[in-house]
Structure formats: C-alpha cells, structure tokens
Amino acid sequence: MKGILMLAEDTINELRKRFNADAARGVSATYKITVRGDGGGSWLVKIQNGGCEFIKQDGTNSGAADCTISAESSDLEMIMDGKMSAMTAVLSGLVSIEGELGLAMQLLPIFFEGQTPTF
C-alpha cells in the first residue's frame, strides 16, 4: 500500500482485509463511502451482526445510508497508512461526514484496530 497512489478499488479491498468481525458485533448500520479522484467510486458498506458487505454503486443501485463518508483517495491512503489521523482529516475538511458522527466513529475499531481512535 505504501509508496504509490491507491485507486478507490484498492482502498476498498484494503478495508475488506482489515474488517474486524468481533469489533462489528452489535453494530447495525449502512455507510456510503465515496472515494474521489482517479479511479474513484462509491460503495455501500452494510455492517450487521459481525458481518460486512461492500456493494459497488453504479447509479442504478444506490441505496440509503445511515452515514456518508467522502474523501480524496490520497487522503484516505494517508489515514490508512497512519500518516494522518481521521480527526485531523475531518477537522481540516479533507474527509466529510454526513449523518451521525457516532456511526463514523464506530468504524475505527472495525477497520483500524490498534490505531488510536482519533475521530
């Protein structure tokens, strides 16, 4: 992951690998993650009872989300590599969140286990 710019699909694949089912137990929410930039795209991420499903959005299958998160691919890469905290990215406007901030915070232990929860 380090050293080269990731495409949105690579970012989503990395999130799939990082998914922590134990941390997701008791969470029931649908997120829309939009990655802007080269190779960008949007995915619905449905987390329920320790499971996770990523659904690529193509305009014809868009669904409702409880929380929407949007960022440039380069900024997400910095967060995923631990070079920038999620809180810094949100406060500086690099990551935008629509909906409940608490739902966005729930993603930290689910996808970023071991990182300081800095949302």
Image: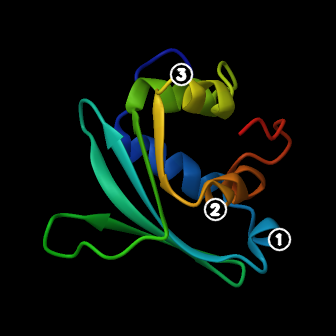
For marks 1 and 2, give the CA distance. 17 Å
> What's the amino acid at mark 2?
Leu
- Tell me, yes or no, if residue 1 can be seen here: no
Which numbered dot is residue 103?
2
For marks 1 and 3, give the CA distance. 31 Å
For image coordinates 26% across by 64% down, the residue present is: 57
Q: Earlier in the sequence, mark 1 or mark 2?
A: 1
> What's the amino acid at mark 1?
Asp
> What's the amino acid at mark 3?
Ser
Q: Secondary structure at mark 3?
A: loop
For image coordinates 73% across by 45% down, the residue present is: 112
| Above/below status of 34 relative to 25 | above
Q: Which residue is mark 3?
A: 92
In the rendered image, residue 62, in percent from the top left (x then y), is placed at: 25, 72
Which of 89/39 is in front? 89
**Quarter location, residue 36:** top left
Display colour scheme: rainbow
Instruction: Indicate the quadrant containing the N terminus: top left, top right, bottom left or bottom right.
Output: top right
> Is residue 11 found left or right of 102 in the rendered image?
left
**Quarter location, residue 25:** bottom right
For the residues carrying marks 1 and 2, which lies nearer the camera in this image? 2
Which of 30/98 is in front? 98
Q: Which residue is mark 1?
A: 22
Q: Earlier in the sequence, mark 2 or mark 3?
A: 3
**Quarter location, residue 17:** bottom right
